[in-house]
Image (cartoon, rainbow, N blue to C red):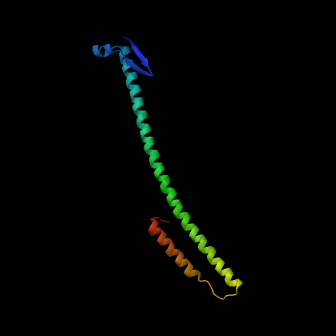
Amino acid sequence: MVNYLLRSQVVQEPSLILNKKLTLTSVGVFYLKNFYYLCVVEDNEKIRLLEDEIVELRFDLKDSRTKEMYYLDILNNINTSISDLFKQEEENERFRINEEIDYRECLINLKKSLNEYKRVYRINF
């Protein structure tokens, strides 16, 4: 009986398989061969699962970036609105215009704007 080693794979001699002689060596070769195939199958399965996980993580990353852009847009709009409000107040003082700014109305408009963002972009905060 001759065993051949080919790239860490143990291959039995064909005559052993045909004669179905079971010796200690042939049983050992059989277990080594099955162990090799199990390792290859398990590795391929692990690779497939990891590839699936990579695809899911890429999708989650894209979704997170999209949400980040929405939040950034909201914050930029709020910042711009507040800056405009302060600028208007400074101009009123500078030119001595007695026009007062209604902060309550500004906050109500801000709340409406945020609710609109929630509705349009389907985000919760």
Q: Is residue 81 visible?
A: yes
Which residue is most to the bottom? 98
Kindly indicate the quadrant of the structure image that contains residue 119. Answer: bottom left
Which residue is most to the top? 1
Q: Residue 8, relative to residue 66: is it above or below?
A: above
Q: Residue 66, relative to residue 11: is it above or below?
A: below
In this picture, residue 2 sits left or right of residue 105: left
Q: Residue at x 41, y 26 (%)?
A: 36
Q: Residue at x 41, y 30 (%)?
A: 40
> Residue 80 location, x and y as percent?
60, 71
> Residue 11 location, x and y as percent?
38, 19
Q: Is residue 28 visible?
A: no
> Residue 1 location, x and y as percent?
36, 10
Q: Residue at x 48, y 49 (%)?
A: 58
> Residue 98 location, x and y as percent?
66, 89
Name the foreground residue: 44 vs 28.
Answer: 44
Q: Residue at x 49, y 54 (%)?
A: 62
Name the foreground residue: 96 vs 36.
Answer: 96
In this picture, residue 98 sits left or right of residue 72: right
